Image (cartoon, helix red, strand yellow):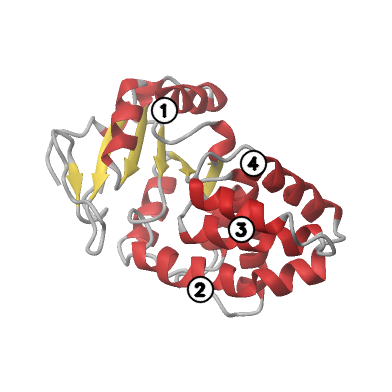
Amino acid sequence: MTSSLPARAAISHIILDIEGTTCPFAFVKETLFPYAADQLEGFLAAEASNPQVEQLLRAVEHAWEHEDNHEALELLANARFAANASTAQRLLPYLKWLIRCDKKLTPLKDLQGLIWERGYEAGHLCAPLFEDVPPALQRWERMGIQLGVYSSGSIKAQQLLYAHSIAGNLQPLFTSWFDTRIGTKQDASSYTAIAFQLKAKPKDILFISDVIAELHAASAAGMHPLLSDRPGNPSREAGTYPVARSFAAVYS
């Protein structure tokens, strides 16, 4: 880690990304996403009459009707021929396409969160956090730093991951949770909105992520950026930002 982080006394909040920051990139791509895709059809068959699921499916359908992607539009055209199919059955190919492409569609993320909830509760899923993360979270919390999460996954998915980690239930260490409802992660206004909700000044917030574009946005909003450089991350270019390969030395 470089030495250009602000002094500990200057930081009141630490906001963390998840994928590639506190949890291995591979767990999300190789475990969570495939699990949601495999369980999706059975979940929808069992829960399609659930009002919450019905509402999410309507939101997905609305997004599909406003797609401009050629492949998604082909799926939509084919679905219109399935006259006797239920809404869930018609949406299934599109939902699987969204998962395969890792689209940041909020109702999809909410559906994935509901599926993962079942998986965590059944013991099929457990979050493999980087070994330096649990002690760092506990250390920062003891210091009086307020911890938050900002991830493209739904708030439910975030909370489930930290509640079912290899280090046990770490969810109580966090005081705030943010997903794409606050805005996209590459937009500076999202970080301004987070600071506003926290009733904190952006300059008092450290944002940690493995994605340079997100650090650009947080920095533009006035937050302090820190790149999490973990093995297996798709990009490990830090640019001018400070870098942490472990959180062991971050405000130790």
Q: Secondary structure at mark 2?
A: loop
Question: Measuring 58% from the left and 48% from the top, which residue is drawn there?
Answer: 73
3D distance between C-alphas at marks 1 and 3? 25 Å
Q: Is residue 238 left or right of residue 211?
A: left
Q: Is residue 9 left or right of residue 119?
A: left
Q: Earlier in the sequence, mark 1 or mark 3?
A: 3
Asked whether 27 or 87 is in front, the reply is 87
Does the image show residue 189? yes
Label 4 near label 1: C-beta < 8 Å?
no
From this view, report whether residue 215 is shown above or below residue 237. above
Mark in the foreground, 2 or 4: 4
3D distance between C-alphas at marks 4 and 3? 11 Å
Around disc 3, counting alpha carbons within 10 Å, would you say few (fewer than 14), some (14 to 19), or many (20 or more)?
many
Asked whether 139 or 112 is in front, the reply is 112
Question: Measuring 59% from the left and 35% from the top, which residue is drawn there?
Answer: 181
3D distance between C-alphas at marks 1 and 2? 31 Å
Question: Measuring 61% from the left and 72% from the top, which residue is drawn there?
Answer: 120
Q: Earlier in the sequence, mark 1 or mark 2?
A: 2
Does the image show residue 156? no
| Residue where numbered disc 3 is placed | 95
Task: Point out residue 62 in the picture as x, y percentages from the top left corner.
Answer: 70, 41
Tell me the kind of residue under disc 2. Cys
Around disc 4, counting alpha carbons within 10 Å, would you say few (fewer than 14), some (14 to 19), or many (20 or more)?
few
Q: Earlier in the sequence, mark 2 or mark 4?
A: 4
Q: Which mark is residue 35?
A: none
Q: Which mark is residue 63?
A: 4
Residue 189 picture quarter: top left
Tell me the kind of residue under disc 1. Asp
| Residue where numbered disc 2 is placed | 126
3D distance between C-alphas at marks 1 and 4? 21 Å
